[in-house]
Image (spheres, rainbow, N blue to C red):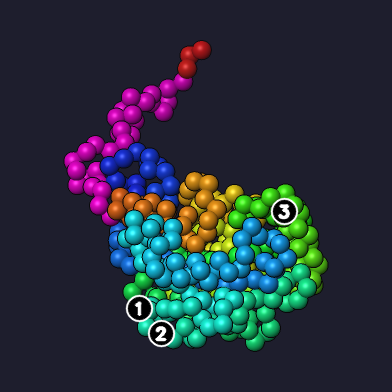
Amino acid sequence: MVAARRRQGELTKPPGALGRLEELSIWISGAQGACPPRPFERVRAIVVAGDHGIAGSGVSAYPSDVTAQMVANFAAGGAAVNVLARQVGAEVRVVDVSVDSPAPVGPAGVDGTAPPERYRVRRSSGRIDREDALSVEEAERAFLVGRLVADEEIDAGADLLVPGEMGIGNTTPAATIVALLCDREPIEVVGRGTGIDDARWMVKTAAIRDAMRRGRPFAGNAASVLRVVGGADLVALAGLLVQAAARRTPVILDGVIVCAAALAAERIAPDARRWWVAGTRSPEPAQAIALHALGLTPLLDAGLRLGEGTGALLAVPMLRAAQATLAEMATFDQAGVSGKATEALDAHRAPAEYSDPT
């Protein structure tokens, strides 16, 4: 990063003229341990799917059946995340950890040939306003599944990960996690999710309040918060984010679900956030609170609230541009361009002994 910062000062441009591209290029160099940084060769969007019992309480505008249907849509390449991934040269993988279906929804694994059962933790997570989302054993398994997925992708050559999610009702546990870990009130974190009306918004606020009441005794332990008021998908995302940092692999964070998992992951593995950038700003208030706690500023604000990793994928071209400008731009010496006119300015400065006669 020191070398990248020095090189930025030697490129044919005024210092800071490329704005956040300069910051990103330095971060990429640090993540890769190389200056100039290498182009990203294998970008992987990983959609972690899971249902939530709280969806049955009326917190969402859509039924839980949509989760399994959308997982099939991802596999067929017809969802927004598939379209945007194709636009930026990324590939999409879907991981069913807790979809409410009799059997895991496939295909699974890096190349789609792994048994889906390898990644399934349970069928839907518990209704968090009345019961724990997961047992201790299920939470441990979900975290290991997330780590496994990260390892599989990195071992297969992934050099940039874009985690996403799919699960009806998942903004409710995400908001609850953020509220507990950041000591906020339900009204501060509740959002509109899939576009709920005022009546459902009130139901959702009450659900978050009741879940927080159950989860408050665990507020000092992020792993327990994930288990009690989160879900298998959120625990798996946290495991993936922790392992990506352990494997020195950069990550672009997406919306409120991924950021809630990231907030917990940072508490579990301090400084894991050094390997992440925030791709997009979500209209969900809990995301802004989580990102503030993480000290991350989103690269884009396009009003996206879909999830799936879509907003983070829009930031991939920015990272590619940051890498390319640092690696490919000529320096002042290479281009034969005069640097900042400090010498000429010094020649016109008054001598040190000069004093204003007035």
Q: Mark 2 belongs to which amino acid?
A: Ala
Q: Mark 3 belongs to which amino acid?
A: Trp
The answer to whether residue 179 of the structure is visible from this angle is no
Q: Around disc 2, counting alpha carbons within 10 Å, would you say few (fewer than 14), some (14 to 19), or many (20 or more)?
A: few
Mark 1 to mark 3: distance in Å?
40 Å
The answer to whether residue 123 of the structure is visible from this angle is yes
Q: What residue is shown at x 44% (from left), y 66% (from top)?
A: 73
Mark 2 to mark 1: distance in Å?
8 Å
Q: What residue is shown at x 72% (from left), y 53% (from top)?
A: 201
Of circles 1 and 3, the one toward us is 3
In the picture, the disc for residue 111 is 1
Q: Which residues are magenta?
A: 327-355
Q: What residue is shown at x 19% (from left), y 47% (from top)?
A: 334
| Element on which disc 1 rests | loop
In this view of the protein, which residue sits in the foreground, 338 or 267? 267
Q: Which residue is mark 3?
A: 201
